[in-house]
Image: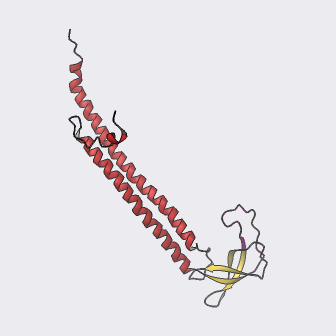
Amino acid sequence: MTTGAGRRGWRFRRSPLRRRSYLVEAWLLLATWTLALVAAVVSGVLIAHAVERNMNGLRSERHTVPAVLTEDAELPVSATEGADGDRAWATVRWTGADGAARTGVARVEPGSRAGSTARVWLDAKDRLVPEPATADQAELQGAVLGTAAAVGAGAAVVLLGRAGCAGLNRRRLAHWDKEWAAVGPQWGRRTG
């Protein structure tokens, strides 16, 4: 009995029973796994860097300004509302870059009273925006999305390779059926 290592390369070995489709299938499988590995690594790295670059760009475009609460901060209904469950909504007023007073609704510390000061995040057009991700959060998010992209790209290539192998197998079975139709009736005759 041959071992697992001895059976792996059987499609590449010369044999009078080996069909050309076995060799094609062997090269297709080798190309599929190689391309899947390359596609996974390249797409994962590119997506991770793109996400980090995008999040770092957002952080550089946003800035904080002091704002005064115009009303008491609403307490969150429950601490399980999401990632920002420890923050409350309140109407705030701040001075824009052009010197005009502006108001808007922002997340602030729960229980903050009207007249207290809070830091809010603004974009280049002095609009309220969510707090950007820190460098560590951007790196983590890039790693997670890069990993997901790598798995997706690798899986797509493997599925395409498997579809090619299935097509080869269907073609091989059809060829065997044709050969058996020619040879099979000869076996039905009995002697003696």
**Which is nearer the eye, 184 or 134?**
134
Residue in view at x 22 percent, y 15 percent: 189
Q: In the figure, 45 relative to 183: above or below?
A: below
- Residue 87 in percent (x, y) is at 71, 70
- Residue 51 in percent (x, y) is at 49, 69
Q: Is residue 140 left or right of residue 112?
A: left
Residue in view at x 39 percent, y 50 percent: 158
**Could you tell me which quadrant the N terminus lies in?**
top left
- Residue 56 in percent (x, y) is at 52, 75
Q: Residue furthest bottom?
A: 99
- Residue 103 in percent (x, y) is at 68, 81
Q: How many marks?
A: 0
Is 70 inside the magenta-drawn segment? Answer: yes
Residue in view at x 69 percent, y 62 percent: 81
Residue in view at x 31 percent, y 39 percent: 169
Please tell me in which quadrant of the rendered image residue 98 appears: bottom right
Colour mode of the rendering: secondary structure
Q: Residue furthest top?
A: 192
Q: In the figure, 156 relative to 187: above or below?
A: below
**Which is nearer the eye, 56 or 92?**
56
Provide the residue span drawn in magenta.
Answer: 68-89
Q: In the figure, 65 relative to 90: above or below?
A: below
Q: Is residue 22 left or right of residue 103?
A: left
